[in-house]
Image (cartoon, rainbow, N blue to C red):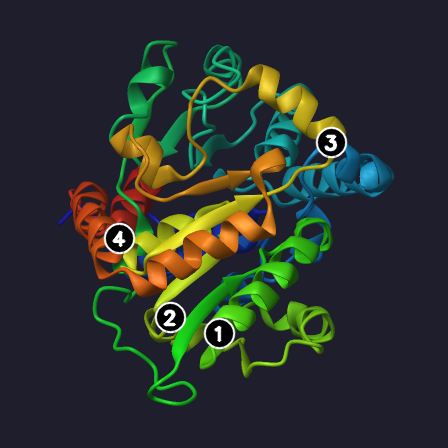
């Protein structure tokens, strides 16, 4: 076995999904090279793995033009702070995880300010196949490598001369496939999962639609309970939002039991994002909804090159999971679809059969985090 010299790895994650990927990556790196040193920016999961975060990851959890502008001064400060910290600590490799708008600005600043910058690797490919295809050529100019999650992605970057590898999705090694359904609430009630999202801005925007959807489900189902998995720092916000819901509401924040909680849901409503793919892997029939700021939406819809928002739909190129995006994000329609899912076994089975295909594609490469760790440590 080839011995790997201990390295100093600088990691940057900007939101909950990146924090999970970063923690899995750190764990895999430590298994291969126990003396590896870590520094950077991350959330609770990465901190548990030994990262001393430079500042709170939540400062970077913004999305969309209207959301970024009020925090622009802080974001510019954080970009400079991160860049200064990397130059001072002089790591062997900088690994940025998702959050491309922040991450790429830091890397470009490093390239300008350092004569011999560290190797710069981005983990989770920008969706150049969905929109802004010219980004592949742009990122090839300042990145040393791209680590992709899906098997159809590397070619977009290799065509531009950038080293790229598909490692598979670390979600497959997260315990989701082995998790058992959690016992939540009464045994004979319908359990509807509600996933508000991980950003304060999107919660504020979409919560009126979600709450009205919950009320419509209550009106049609006498015995229903709502399960709301969320992050610990969002519990207070979610609790205040659902205080007038009449049916039992279970707000779950324990990340160790995350997958068991997912599997306790008979059906679910999720804000569009990584959680949709997580629900597909957990085999939970669901729908997704999303509402952007109107100005952001007007710009985004002109740039988008694909028909779907849900990754399962994108991967299969047909609709598996119903999508309610922007003008179609209407509580009555969402509630009707969820009620149909609850009451029609055939509709649930149609989704779960397709989810089996998705899991096969995501699990085609074993130990994704180990593959990523091995690739980074050998740069």
Q: How many marks?
A: 4
**Which residue occupies the extreme left position in the image?**
1
Specify whether 221 is left or right of 39: left
Precedes in sequence: disc 1 or disc 4: 1
Q: Which residue is mark 4?
A: 347
Q: Are marks 2 and 1 in contact (CB under 8 Å)?
A: yes
The answer for how far apart the CA atoms under marks 2 and 4 are is 15 Å
Query: Residue at the location (22% across, 64% down)?
Result: 177
Precedes in sequence: disc 2 or disc 3: 2
Label 4 crowd (10 A; few <14 / some 14-19 / many >=20): some
The one nearer the camera, 199 or 299, is 299
Specify whether 181 is left or right of 234: left
The answer for how far apart the CA atoms under marks 1 and 4 are is 21 Å
Which type of secondary structure does the marked residue at label 2 adopt?
loop
The one nearer the camera, 217 or 295, is 217
Which type of secondary structure does the marked residue at label 3 adopt?
helix
- Image location (x, y in percent) of residue 355: 23, 49
Precedes in sequence: disc 2 or disc 4: 2
Q: Which residue is mark 1?
A: 227
- Image location (x, y in percent) of residue 15: 58, 51
Query: Residue at the location (52% across, 66% down)?
Result: 217
Q: Which residue is mark 3?
A: 294
From where the camera sits, is residue 375 visible? yes
The answer for how far apart the CA atoms under marks 4 and 3 are is 32 Å
**In the rendered image of this protein, does residue 315 appear above or below residue 174?**
above
- Image location (x, y in percent) of residue 347: 26, 53
- Image location (x, y in percent) of residue 329: 59, 43
């Amino acid at each position: 076995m080839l011995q790997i010299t201990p390295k100093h790895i600088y990691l940057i994650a900007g939101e909950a999904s990146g924090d999970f990927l970063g923690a899995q990556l750190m764990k895999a790196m430590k298994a291969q090279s126990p003396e590896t040193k870590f520094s950077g920016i991350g959330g609770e999961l990465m901190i548990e793995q030994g990262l001393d975060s430079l500042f709170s990851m939540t400062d970077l959890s913004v999305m969309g033009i209207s959301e970024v502008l009020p925090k622009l001064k802080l974001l510019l400060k954080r970009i400079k702070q991160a860049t200064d910290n990397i130059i001072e600590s002089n790591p062997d490799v900088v690994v940025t995880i998702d959050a491309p708008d922040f991450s790429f600005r830091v890397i470009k600043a490093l390239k300008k300010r350092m004569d011999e910058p560290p190797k710069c690797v981005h983990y989770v490919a920008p969706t150049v196949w969905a929109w802004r295809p010219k980004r592949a050529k742009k990122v090839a100019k300042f990145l040393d490598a791209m680590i992709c999650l899906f098997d159809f992605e590397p070619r977009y970057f290799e065509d531009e001369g950038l080293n790229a590898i598909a490692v598979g999705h670390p979600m497959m090694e997260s315990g989701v496939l082995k998790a058992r359904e959690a016992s939540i609430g009464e045994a004979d009630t319908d359990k509807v999962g509600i996933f508000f999202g991980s950003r304060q801005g999107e919660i504020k925007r979409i919560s009126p639609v979600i709450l009205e959807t919950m009320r419509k489900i209550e009106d049609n189902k006498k015995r229903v309970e709502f399960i709301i998995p969320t992050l610990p720092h969002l519990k207070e916000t979610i609790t205040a939002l659902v205080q007038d819901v009449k049916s039992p509401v279970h707000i779950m924040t324990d990340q160790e039991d995350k997958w068991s909680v997912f599997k306790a849901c008979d059906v679910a409503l999720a804000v569009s994002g990584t959680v949709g793919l997580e629900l597909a892997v957990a085999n939970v029939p669901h729908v997704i909804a999303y509402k952007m700021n109107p100005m952001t939406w007007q710009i985004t819809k002109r740039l988008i090159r694909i028909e779907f928002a849900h990754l399962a739909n994108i991967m299969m190129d047909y609709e598996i999971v119903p999508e309610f995006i922007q003008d179609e994000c209407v509580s009555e329609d969402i509630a009707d679809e969820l009620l149909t899912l609850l009451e029609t076994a055939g509709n649930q089975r149609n989704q779960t059969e397709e989810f089996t295909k998705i899991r096969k594609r995501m699990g085609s490469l074993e130990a994704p985090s180990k593959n990523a760790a091995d690739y980074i440590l050998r740069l």
